[in-house]
Image: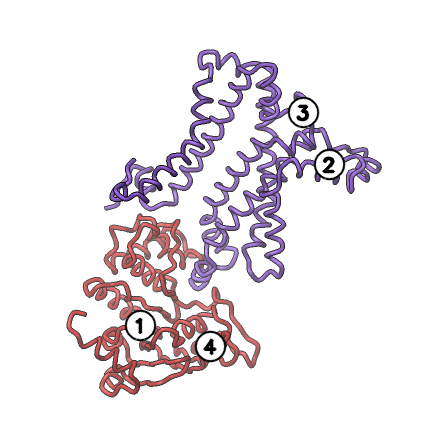
Chain colours: A red, B purple
Amino acid sequence: MTLDARVRVTRAAFCLDVAVRVPAGTVLAVMGPNGSGKSTLLEAIAGLAPLTAGHVRLADDVLADVAAGRHVPPHERRLGVALQDGLLFGHLTARENVAFGPRAQGVRATAARATADALLADVGLAALARTRADRLSGGQAQRVAVARAVAARPRALLLDEPFGALDAATRAPVRALVRRAVATGLPALVVTHDLRDALELADHLLVLQDGREVQRGTPADVASAPATPYVEHVVAAASWPGS
Amino acid sequence: MSVRGRGASPGGVLLVALASVGTAVLVLPLVALLLATPWSALPTLVGDPTVLQALRLSLLTAGTATLVALALGVPLAWVLAHDDLRGAWLLRSLVTVPLVLPPVVGGVALLLLLGRRGLVGGALDTWFGVTVPFTSVAVVLAQLFVSLPFLVLSVEGALRGASRRRALAAQTLGASPAYVLRRVTLPSVAPGVAAGAALCFTRALGEFGATVTFAGSFPGTTRTMPLAVSQAMDSAPEQAVAMSVLLLLLSVAVLVALRGRWLGGLPGAHAVRSGRTPR
């Protein structure tokens, strides 16, 4: 199951125009300065940002194709999405947040909750399963958001800054969870600000700037030959131990 | 209550002094009311048939006005909360007008619309033999006119806070729009709807100007509590005080109920209320 997308999204003065191809079982990390279009790319694939041109395909399934006038609504795309800021449902518990996807898709509540509990345990939050989501800290909410995306029985993972609020100790189990989900044959697109996430997790790295691709390659290749001042900057930031 | 670290400067003293005067303006009249209340005679005074009649009418009309406001106001708020509507600003201005309008003007306007020779009232009278003014229905309409904006603006705020992006996040997890409405949007706006309904109810309960103009003050059909209080001030001041205290208690009760709802949405309140602590 390969994710193949060529998207153009036009918003006022901003235009994103980029192509990505993520083979099954691999992770594509997307980096770039603020406003470079990383989140827009993810939202375009998820069906939340309308394309002005291009297509989104998952294996043989055409999720969007502007030329053919096709746009599958977000809730029928079967993608595991964690948007920036988590956007948990504050009135539900952590467990019900993670169980939300399967339950929305018709899985029985008891089975969905069992799945949720297992995933919460994976990210170290078993003790907070019954806590309302609006009482979780930023880092806890972020881990719930990743578990929720994985729980939604996705055919691909789209994660927007899934590790941003996490320290080194909590980051490891979340990365491991993403890696296990990918190992089942999912393509994954992970937006990040931290080159170490890309080096740890990703098979390929795409660097965006002003809505365009400025560099692409394996994370190690990109790190060893920065093409722009921004990439030089993230390489420097990642080489500070403990930062 | 103490304002720490500010008391020393002259500006701080002035600030605290003005805040105290402000508090006094709001609180002292109520203190006077409570001090003047003949507490031991209260049950007898409140148990008077004319008081009970007014109370019953008030609760019935204000309750009806609130239900109608919910049925009409939630859809109206929904329309206002969606920016894609052209002319939403105009609609919002129109909805806000009764909020700033003197209620008596609302009463006059209702009379000119629904009175026997009014814009619509004439036709109602000629064709259906229906007369609205000076009936209990007129009381409800007067209350609805002044209280509906409170509900609409409160619910609109809640709908905006519910965030379109959260609904989109739910969709990406495979939830159909109807499922999102049922499990995400409605539960998250429920506290706002409850708050709006409570505000709407208390405003309807206290309605005077529009009611007296459009519905008159007939015992049993249109003389609600505020009208009865005004009436009793001349003839039976003690009863007026007793009814005023009753209205005060009712309003405070709604406020307390409302606070409980708001607390329900705040961090920590869940564990406090259910007696559990997070592990």
Where is residue B133 drawn, in percent x and y?
A: 73, 32
Q: Residue at x 53, y 34 (%)?
A: B202
Q: CA distance from mark 3 to mark 1?
A: 69 Å
User: Residue A192 shows which numbered tag?
Assistant: 1
Q: Disc 4 vs disc 3: Cβ atoms closer than 8 Å? A: no
User: Residue B279 shows which numbered tag?
Assistant: none
Q: Residue type at mark 3?
A: Ser
User: Residue B217 shows which numbered tag?
Assistant: 3
Q: CA distance from mark 2 to mark 4?
A: 55 Å
For mark 3, name the chain: B
For mark 1, name the chain: A
Q: Residue type at mark 4?
A: Phe
Q: Secondary structure at mark 4?
A: strand
Of the pair B110 and A132, the residue shown nearer to us = B110
Q: Tell me the mark number nearer the camera, choosing from 4 and 1.
A: 4
The answer to whether residue A212 is above or below residue A120 is below
Q: Secondary structure at mark 2?
A: helix
Q: Tell me the mark number nearer the camera, choosing from 4 and 3.
A: 3
Q: CA distance from mark 3 to mark 2?
A: 15 Å
Q: Secondary structure at mark 1?
A: loop
Residue on which disc 2 sits: B111
User: Do the residues marked 2 and 4 share a common chain?
Assistant: no
Residue on which disc 4 sits: A14
Q: CA distance from mark 4 to mark 3?
A: 63 Å
Residue B169 placement, left or right of B224: left
Q: Disc 3 vs disc 1: Cβ atoms closer than 8 Å? A: no
